[in-house]
């Protein structure tokens, strides 16, 4: 544990030096404030929910795009950068295993991501409380969104480490990371939507579609938060499927994917030769 913490401290100093802490904080704060100010406007139309719950629904859509992107940007260089700079052979001469190196990097990057999420969501919650006296009803949904966002970030951090180990060059790892983000966060939903339109209410829509959503960590995260919160009416698009999938089914991928992604990254790192 001491070796993991020592690695985490070193990675945290590198993240601060590379401005990743500042960049993550600014991005989450700016987008959260914009959504809190604009995204909760439908409450004036009488949705029957407090402003913080509607803000949480908006933040859920933001987090699906921004948290994976931040996680991949912080992690794609983690192993490939060590290989290119020639520091990996030196690192592996220390009395520390590769798994401990990976866990130390994960701990540091997850700390940066958690800080950005807490600051961003906290600012959005402050705006909701300032404009709605009943906003306290949405605190449970906000807490749920916070810890699931951290788990979503852990999933994509693990995926980023795995791609970094496979590519072994930062430029290749960056391309793979952007490709993964586009595939899972953007194109996956578009492909499902196209399949539903082509299916016309057939077996794909009724039998395959719910499981296809759960197979994607980003969609499972969004479904869990929309299903568990009381602001589904404020969501659109994929939110319509949230009511058809039990909460526990959407929670399982949220809990399992971070473990699987980290384990796969560990396997990929074991094959990297200094």
Image (cartoon, helix red, strand yellow):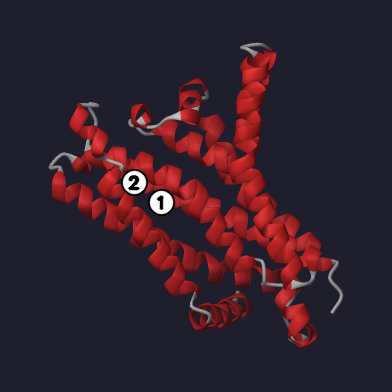
User: Percent position (x, y) of residue 166?
Assistant: 80, 63
Residue 115 in sight = no
- Front residue of 125/23: it is 23
Considering the image in quadrants, where does the C terminus appear?
bottom right
Above or below, 6 against 184 in this view is below
Above or below, 112 against 250 in this view is below
Residue for badge 1: 146
Above or below, 174 against 139 in this view is below
Q: Residue at x 64, y 38 (%)?
A: 188
Q: Label 2, label 1: how many angstroms apart (C-alpha)?
A: 6 Å
Marks 1 and 2: in contact by CB < 8 Å?
A: yes
The tag on residue 142 is 2
Q: Secondary structure at mark 2?
A: helix
Q: Secondary structure at mark 1?
A: helix
Q: Residue at x 63, y 51 (%)?
A: 181
Q: Is residue 229 found left or right of 202 in the rendered image? A: left
| Quadrant of residue 53 within the rendered picture | top left
Q: Residue at x 24, y 27 (%)?
A: 47
Q: Is residue 160 found left or right of 64 in the rendered image? A: right
The tag on residue 167 is none
Q: Residue at x 44, y 38 (%)?
A: 225
Residue 62 in sight = yes
């Amino acid at each position: 544990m001491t070796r993991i913490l020592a690695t985490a401290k070193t990675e945290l100093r590198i993240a601060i030096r590379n401005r990743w802490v500042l960049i993550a904080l600014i991005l989450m704060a700016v987008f959260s404030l914009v959504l809190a100010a604009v995204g909760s406007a439908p409450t004036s139309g009488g949705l029957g929910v407090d402003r913080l719950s509607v803000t949480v629904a908006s933040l859920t859509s933001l987090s699906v795009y921004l948290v994976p992107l931040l996680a991949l940007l912080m992690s794609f260089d983690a192993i490939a950068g060590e290989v290119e700079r020639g520091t990996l052979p030196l690192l592996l001469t220390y009395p520390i295993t590769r798994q401990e190196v990976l866990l130390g990097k994960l701990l540091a990057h997850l700390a940066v991501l958690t800080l950005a999420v807490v600051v961003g969501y906290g600012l959005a919650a402050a705006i909701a409380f300032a404009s709605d006296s009943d906003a306290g009803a949405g605190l449970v949904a906000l807490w749920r969104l916070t810890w699931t966002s951290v788990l979503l970030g852990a999933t994509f951090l693990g995926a980023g480490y795995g791609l970094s180990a496979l590519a072994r060059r930062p430029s290749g790892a960056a391309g793979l990371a952007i490709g993964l983000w586009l595939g899972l966060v953007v194109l996956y939903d578009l492909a499902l939507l196209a399949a539903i339109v082509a299916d016309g209410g057939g077996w794909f829509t009724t039998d395959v579609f719910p499981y296809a959503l759960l197979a994607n960590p980003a969609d499972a995260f969004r479904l869990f938060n929309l299903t568990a919160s009381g602001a589904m009416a404020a969501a659109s698009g994929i939110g319509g499927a949230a009511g058809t999938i039990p909460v526990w089914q959407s929670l399982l991928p949220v809990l399992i994917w971070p473990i699987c992604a980290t384990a796969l990254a560990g396997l990929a790192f074991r094959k990297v030769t200094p």
